[in-house]
Image: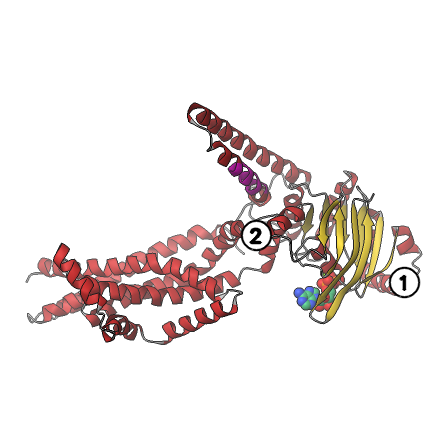
Amino acid sequence: MDFLQVTLYLLDGFKLTCLLFALTLIISLPLGLLISFCTMSKIKPVSYVARVIVWIVRGVPLMLQIFIIYYVPGFFDFNIFAKVDNFFFLNTGMKDMGRFIAVLIAFSVNYACYFSEIFRGGIQSIPVGQYEACAVLGMKRRQTFIHIILPQVIKRIVPPTSNEVITLVKDTALSRVILVSELIMQAEKLMASALIWPLFYSGVFYLVFVGILTLLFNYIEKKLSYYKV
Amino acid sequence: MALLEVTGITKKFGETEVLKGINFELDKGEVLTIIGSSGSGKTTLLRCLNYLETADTGKVVLDGEIIFDGNEKGKIKAEEIRRKRLNLGLVFQSFNLFPHYNVLKNVTVAPTMHAKEKLKEQKKSISRLKGEQKKKAKEELKKRKEEILSGIEKEAKEVLVRVGLGDKLLSYPCELSGGQQQRVAIARALILKPKILCFDEPTSALDPELTGEVLRVIRELKNDGRTMIIVTHEMGFAKSVSDKVIFMSEGVVAEEGTPRKIFDNPENPVTKAFLASAKDSDF
Ligand SMILES: Nc1ncnc2c1ncn2[C@@H]1O[C@H](COP(=O)(O)OP(=O)(O)OP(=O)(O)O)[C@@H](O)[C@H]1O
Ligand SMILES: [Mg+2]
């Protein structure tokens, strides 16, 4: 295989990496906000349960969580992901959809929990005076949150969030533990034909991706620097 | 009848009784200043009037409308509190401007929200209409919306000019001095046309050379006939601006009267002691 062929072959895996990355963000950001609301809830059982979930999810290796999500349904004789695999293969010819969905669930929940802690920190760092000012101006709670609190929270959480997002790029490689053909797994397959350099070459894809994200986050930070708190 | 009647307001935080039955009245156009030592409950009283705290017992009647009733406090809905509290405005010691909005937007944001809410209701009633009629009503509403919003902006500019910030409309709070920020906060409260404007130590967070510009604005508001309640440690200002002074001590109104009476002829020995110590530090 020449360089171009290898590149195309790796791009196949990289597509899946990007898809997993994007879908995880799309699901985990709003889910994280929801979980952060739960952890801050005045209803004690809700906040308690949410905190325990966050503790477990952040306390167990993501790799293990992928295994758990993928294999546990099988213990109950309900191998949902294998069924999804089959379903998609028979109907669309796509392979490994069930595995992909299992990984997506694990990633989304895991990252939602990390994001929820970032959001919670951001929301709780807004001085109570902001809420009180809104209250005496007759704003509703919804208006207060959307127009006054959230914009300030976003400014504060951009740096920690960008850290998590960059970590996510590289964490996607973990999905190969249940044989999702992401970038590194594709590179590994080539080792069967005695090609080692593609494995190292795959690092370039991550570097470029992370480089673009870094520029993007720098841009956002700059955009939001028009005011100080 | 007085514009504001406050009777028997009590408030406990846990076991500590911070307000032990506050009574006072205020007429339209009058300025009331509340003085008293630290921890006597002045802030708590203002916060109760503005529903930032819920008093335990007592009654507040403003312009004939019951603003707070200790016997009904569990039953009142959030929406009603929101409406009632707009009768009063509150300016905080720490300004609490919205840092992500410029000066103009800080002032327009609340009235714009209120206007949009009203327009939304009207929009709902339009949706029942049909065909040509509906189209026409929609266009009219759109025009009215533009008028209202530009009206709010015009008014905001006027109030900002009044507090001396006509040239700072597009600045952000972080670019302003404390005195300027506090004047924005005053404009932000004024545009909602509260029947009574409350101030909680409006100059305490300011460098001494900046207090003058804020006090001047408050004095001008008095000259316009605004009804105000001012908690302050600026004794000279209190004496000259108020029609009525309340001296609070340990959760009760220890003495009240005209500024002359309170500052020149206090009866209560506690008032005397407080004023003597205030003289040492303030004058
Ligand atoms: N949220 C709260 N929880 C518990 N105690 C409170 C709370 N708010 C105020 N207090 C207590 O109530 C008392 C009165 O406080 P308040 O802030 O009303 O006093 P103040 O007269 O405004 O004093 P200062 O001149 O220092 O501003 C104080 O002893 C204070 O510790
Ligand atoms: Mg106070």
Q: In this view, does B150 lie above or below A229?
A: above
User: Residue at the spot x=29%, y=61% of the render?
Assistant: A210
Q: Which of B59 and B108 is in front in this view?
A: B59
Left or right: A7 as drawn, with respect to B187: left
Quadrant of ligand 1 in image: bottom right
Secondary-structure class at tag 1: helix
* The C terminus of chain B sits in image quarter: bottom right
Quadrant hosting residue A208: bottom left
Q: Can residue B237 be seen in this view?
A: no
Q: Does the beta carbon at disc 1 come under 8 Å from ligand 1? A: no
Q: How crowded is mark 1: few (under 14 residues within 10 Å), some or many (20 or more)?
A: some
How far apart marks 2 and 1 lie (CA) works out to 41 Å
Question: Quick one: SS at disc 2?
Answer: helix
Indicate the position of residue B106 as horizontal and vertical percent values.
58, 45
Q: For the residue marked with disc 1, what is the amino acid?
A: Lys
How is the structure coloured here? secondary structure
Q: Dot 2: few (<14), some (14–19), or many (≥20) neighbours within 10 Å?
A: some
**Residue A173 in sight from this viewpoint:** yes
Could you tell whether B163 is left or right of A173 in the image?
Answer: right
For this orientation, the residue located farthest to the top is B132
Count every numbered label the image shows and give the total.
2
Q: Give the range drawn in magenta.
A: B111-121
x then y, percent, for residue A125: 53, 63
Q: Where does the N terminus of chain B fall, quadrant-wise?
A: top right
Q: Against B254, is A148 above or below?
A: above
* Residue depth check, mark 2 versus mark 1: number of the one nearer the observer: 1
User: Residue B40, position in %: x, y?
Assistant: 78, 64
Q: Name the residue under label 2.
A: B174
Residue B281 located left or right of residue A178: right
Q: Mark 1 lies on which chain?
A: B
Residue B272 — which label?
Answer: 1
Q: Where is residue B231 in the image (x, y as percent from the top left)?
A: 76, 55
